[in-house]
Amino acid sequence: MKRRDPEGKTINLLDLIPVRTISWERNEKGLIVLLKPKFRHPFIVKHFLSRLRKPHYRINLDSIGSYVWEQCDGNRSVKEVAENMGQEFGEKVEPLYDRLTLFLQSLEKNHFIYYKGLQGRTNLNCYEN
């Protein structure tokens, strides 16, 4: 759960603080639905996005993903999120750290979150074991 930044320093994922970057809402079951804009280019967003019937892709999260998404509020570290997940779901989320790492990698890769203090500096594809 460690990686190297461009300067060669080792960064522990558990110490990082994830922050949400896209809009979201709750569905009728109380689960999170992420709203990913169909376009990101400023010109297209300004002139066309508002005219579309469905300007966002809707990404439905399960109960565990919804819980993690709510925890990524910019105040909790990944370690705190993992501890809270373990308390909330118990054995259902084992292997906890592997599962959480893969989910957070996916969120960061799709630009749904960033890590406070690391925005634009590194990516999560350079992990050490």
Image: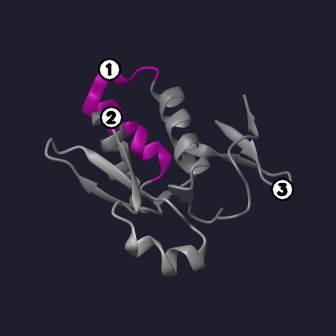
Determine contact: label 1, label 3, CB under 8 Å.
no
N-terminal-most mark, 1 or 3: 3
In the displayed structure, would residue 118 be above or below residue 127?
below
| Magenta stretch, overall SS | helix
Question: How far across and down, in percent of the image, does residue 112 sit?
Answer: 50, 55
Q: Secondary structure at mark 3?
A: loop
Find the distance from the CA under tag 1 to the CA under tag 2. 9 Å
N-terminal-most mark, 1 or 2: 2
User: What residue appears at the point 23 percent right and 43 percent down from the top-left corner?
Assistant: 31
User: What residue appears at the point 48 percent right and 35 percent down from the top-left corner?
Assistant: 100
Residue 23 is drawn in which quadrant? bottom left
Q: Which quarter of the image is occupied by the N terminus?
A: top right
In the picture of the structure, the residue carrying the numbered disc 3 is: 6
Q: Could you classify mark 3 by the number of other residues whose Cα lies within 10 Å: few (under 14), some (14-19), or many (20 or more)? A: few
Residue 115 sits inside the magenta stretch: no
Q: Nearer the viewer, residue 56 or 63?
A: 56
Residue 29 is drawn in which quadrant? top left
